[in-house]
C-alpha cells in the first residue's frame, strides 16, 4: 500500500488518477439517466468487488483454512450476482430497506452512548430519516430500484470528481471542524425530503381497496364449474329497487385446471315467481392485482361501472358482474386470455342461477366493454360447447379489445410511451403466468423484472399508477424495458390465439367511439367486415365526440341503442347494419 501511495504523488501517478477520475465522471454522468444500465453496472461492481475481496483474503495468508472458506463463499456470491442478476436487482429494494433499518439502529446506539449534543441530535435525525427511507423503499420498490441505479451513477460521478481534485491538488483535505456541521445540515435536508415523500405516499395510498377474507378459499375447488361456494351481502352503492350479494364460485382456466372467481349479483328487490333474464356484464381493464376487483370496492354495480344497469333492474333482469379469476380471489388472472375470461363469464351466469332470491332463468345477455368486450366475444364463441344449457340471447361487445396482437403491436411500436410501459406489464405478467413459453426473463430487461411486476401490482384507476407512469418516464432514456417480439415467437403466437373472431350464434352488437384513444376503431371495423363477409348478423355503431370511457357513460347514445337492439332481438327481429 505504501508503494501505491508514493506512486500516486508522482506526476505519472497524478496523471493516472486524473484519467481514471475523468473516465468515472463521464461514465457516471452517462449512467445517471440510464438507471437500468446503472443497476447492471452496480451488480457487476459488487461481483467484481467480491472476487477481489476473495483474492486479497487468500493472498494475505494461504495457510488459514477459514480464509479459504470465506474466499470460496465470496466467490460463490460473485457468481450468483452475475448468473442471477435479475433476482439480485429484484431484491435490492427490500435489502436496502433492511440495511437502512440496521443503520438507524446503529445510529440510535451511537447517539445514546457517546458524542456531543450536536452529534447525538444529528445521529437521531439520521436514524429517523433512515427509518422513513426504509419504509419508502419497501412500499415503492420500483422507485427504490430506479433511485438505486441513479444513486450508483451519482456515486461514480462523485468518486470521479474526487479523484480529479486530488490529482490536481494532492494536499486537498476537508476541514474536520466543518464535518459535524455539514453532517447535521445534510441530515436535516434528508429528513425533510423523507418526510415530504412519506406524506406524499400516504396521500397516494389513501382509500386503496383491500381484499377481505370473503375471497379466500382454503379447501379444494369443486370440479363443478359455476358452483357457488360462498355468498355475502354487497355493501356498495346499489341501483334503486335492487338488492345485491357477492358470490364466490368455481370456474376453470383455459387449460381446464380449477379456478376461483368472484362476482356481484344484483336483482330487483320485488319478489316474483317468474324466472328473470340474466345480464352478464364483463368489466374493462382495472388492473391485474387482486385488489383491482370491482366487487372489492363500492362502485361495482353503478351506472359508472355498468351502463344502463338501472334500466336492467327496471326490466326485471338479474345482473351478474364477474371479477374474473385472480381478481379478488387468488390464482392466475386470465387478462386477455379469451378462453379463461369466457369460462369465468359463463360460470358467473351459472352462479347467478343459484341465488334463490334472484330467480334467474337460463336465458342470458352477455355484454362487456374494452377488456370485457374481449371476454364477452369469447364467452359467446365458446358458450355452445362450454355451457350448452345457457340460452344466449345476444352478445354486445363495446369498444372491444378483440385483437390483443394488434394492441400489442401498437403499444410496443412507434406509439410506445411511459403509459404504454405500464399497460404492457398488465398483459405480459398474466401471460407469463398463464403460458410456460412466455417468460419475463426473455421479455424484460435483466434489471427490470421487479419494476414490471410492481407495475402489474397496481390498479389502473388508483393514484399509485401515477408513480408507475413517472418511473416509466424515468426509464425513457435507458435501454428498452421490454424485449418483446410481437412479430414472431411465443408471445406473438399466444396473443394471436386469443384474438376473438366474433363468430357467435347469438345476435351481435358492436359499438365504439370513432376516435377511441385506447382501442383503435379499425379493430371494430375489421371485425365487422369479416363477420359481414361471412354473412353473420351484426349491428354496428360508431359514436362521435365520445372517449373510450365516455361511450358507456351515463347519457351516451350507445345505451339507448343497446337497449333498443335488445328489444328488437326480443321481438324476433334480427337487425343488421354491417358498415363494410
Image (cartoon, rainbow, N blue to C red):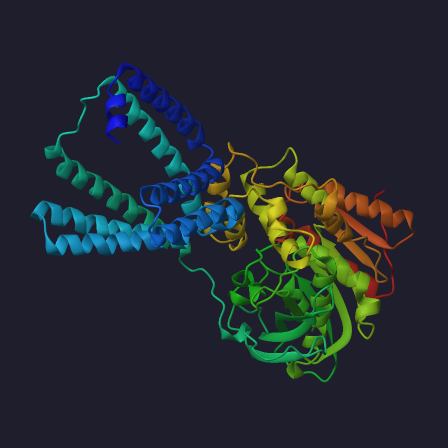
The answer to whether residue 565 is left or right of residue 519 is right
Q: How many marks?
A: 0
Front-most of residues 488 and 397: 488
Front-most of residues 343 and 67: 67
Residue 251: give x, y in percent of width and height: 69, 71
Give the quarter of the image for residue 58.
Answer: top left
Rendered position, 342 above or below 447: below
Rendered position, 439 above or below 353: above
Furthest-top residue in this view:
11
Residue at 64 percent across and 75 percent down: it is 249
Residue at 54 percent across and 43 percent down: it is 446
Residue 396: give x, y in percent of width and height: 75, 58
Report if residue 97 is visible in the image.
Answer: yes
Quadrant in which the N terminus appears: top left
Quadrant in which the C terminus appears: top right
Residue 260: give x, y in percent of width and height: 63, 71
Rendered position, 181 above or below 220: above
Residue 19: give x, y in percent of width and height: 36, 19
The answer to whether residue 421 is left or right of residue 132 is right
Amino acid at each position: 500500500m505504501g508503494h501505491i501511495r508514493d506512486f500516486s504523488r508522482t506526476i505519472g501517478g497524478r496523471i493516472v488518477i486524473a484519467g481514471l477520475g475523468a473516465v468515472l465522471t463521464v461514465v457516471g454522468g452517462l449512467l445517471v439517466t440510464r438507471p437500468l444500465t446503472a443497476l447492471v453496472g452496480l451488480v457487476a461492481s459488487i461481483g467484481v468487488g467480491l472476487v477481489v475481496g476473495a483474492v486479497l483474503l487468500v493472498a494475505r495468508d494461504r495457510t488459514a483454512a477459514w480464509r479459504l472458506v470465506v474466499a470460496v463463499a465470496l466467490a460463490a456470491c460473485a457468481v450468483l450476482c452475475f448468473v442471477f442478476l435479475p433476482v439480485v436487482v429484484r431484491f435490492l429494494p427490500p435489502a436496502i430497506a433492511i440495511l437502512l433499518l440496521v443503520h438507524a439502529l446503529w445510529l440510535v446506539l451511537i447517539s445514546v452512548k457517546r458524542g456531543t449534543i450536536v452529534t447525538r441530535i444529528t445521529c437521531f435525525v439520521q436514524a429517523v430519516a433512515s427509518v422513513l427511507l426504509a419504509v419508502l423503499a419497501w412500499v415503492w420498490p420500483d422507485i427504490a430500484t430506479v433511485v438505486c441505479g441513479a444513486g450508483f451513477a451519482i456515486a461514480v460521478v462523485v468518486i470521479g470528481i474526487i479523484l480529479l481534485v486530488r490529482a490536481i491538488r494532492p494536499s486537498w483535505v476537508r476541514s474536520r471542524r466543518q464535518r459535524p456541521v455539514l453532517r447535521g445540515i445534510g441530515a436535516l435536508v434528508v429528513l425533510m425530503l423523507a418526510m415530504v415523500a412519506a406524506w406524499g405516499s400516504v396521500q397516494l395510498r389513501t382509500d386503496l381497496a383491500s381484499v377481505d377474507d370473503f375471497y379466500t378459499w382454503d379447501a379444494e375447488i369443486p370440479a363443478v364449474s359455476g358452483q357457488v361456494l360462498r355468498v355475502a351481502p354487497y355493501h356498495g352503492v346499489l341501483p334503486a329497487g335492487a338488492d345485491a350479494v357477492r358470490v364466490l364460485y368455481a370456474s376453470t382456466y383455459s387449460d381446464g385446471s380449477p379456478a376461483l372467481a368472484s362476482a356481484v349479483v344484483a336483482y330487483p328487490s320485488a319478489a316474483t315467481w317468474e324466472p328473470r333474464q340474466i345480464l352478464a356484464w364483463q368489466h374493462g381493464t382495472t388492473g391485474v392485482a387482486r385488489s383491482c376487483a370491482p366487487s372489492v370496492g363500492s362502485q361495482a354495480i353503478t351506472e359508472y361501472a355498468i351502463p344502463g344497469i338501472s334500466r336492467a333492474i327496471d326490466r326485471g333482469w338479474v345482473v351478474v358482474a364477474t371479477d374474473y379469476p385472480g381478481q379478488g380471489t387468488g390464482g392466475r388472472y386470465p387478462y386477455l386470455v379469451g378462453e379463461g375470461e369466457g369460462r369465468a363469464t359463463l360460470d358467473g351466469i351459472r352462479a347467478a342461477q343459484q341465488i334463490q332470491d334472484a330467480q334467474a332463468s337460463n336465458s342470458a345477455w352477455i355484454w362487456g366493454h374494452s377488456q370485457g368486450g374481449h371476454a364477452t366475444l369469447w364467452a359467446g364463441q365458446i358458450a355452445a360447447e362450454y355451457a350448452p344449457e345457457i340460452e344466449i340471447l345476444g352478445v354486445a361487445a363495446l369498444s372491444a379489445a378483440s385483437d390483443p396482437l394488434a394492441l400489442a403491436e401498437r403499444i410496443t411500436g412507434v406509439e410506445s410511451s411511459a403509459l404504454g410501459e405500464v399497460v404492457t406489464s398488465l398483459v405480459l405478467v398474466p401471460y407469463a403466468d398463464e403460458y410456460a413459453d412466455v417468460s419475463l426473463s426473455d421479455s424484460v430487461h435483466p434489471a427490470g423484472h421487479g419494476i414490471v411486476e410492481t407495475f402489474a401490482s397496481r390498479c389502473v384507476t388508483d393514484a399509485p399508477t401515477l408513480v408507475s407512469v413517472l418511473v416509466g418516464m424515468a426509464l425513457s432514456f435507458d435501454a428498452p424495458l421490454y424485449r418483446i417480439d410481437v412479430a414472431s415467437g411465443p408471445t406473438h403466437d399466444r396473443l394471436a390465439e386469443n384474438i376473438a373472431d366474433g363468430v357467435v350464434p347469438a345476435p351481435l352488437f358492436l359499438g365504439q367511439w370513432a376516435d377511441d384513444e385506447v382501442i383503435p376503431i379499425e379493430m371494430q371495423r375489421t371485425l365487422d367486415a369479416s363477420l359481414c363477409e361471412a354473412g353473420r348478423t351484426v349491428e354496428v355503431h360508431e359514436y362521435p365526440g365520445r372517449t373510450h370511457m365516455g361511450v358507456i357513460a351515463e347519457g351516451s347514445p350507445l345505451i339507448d341503442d343497446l337497449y333498443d337492439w335488445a328489444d328488437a332481438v326480443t321481438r324476433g327481429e334480427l337487425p343488421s347494419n354491417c358498415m363494410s
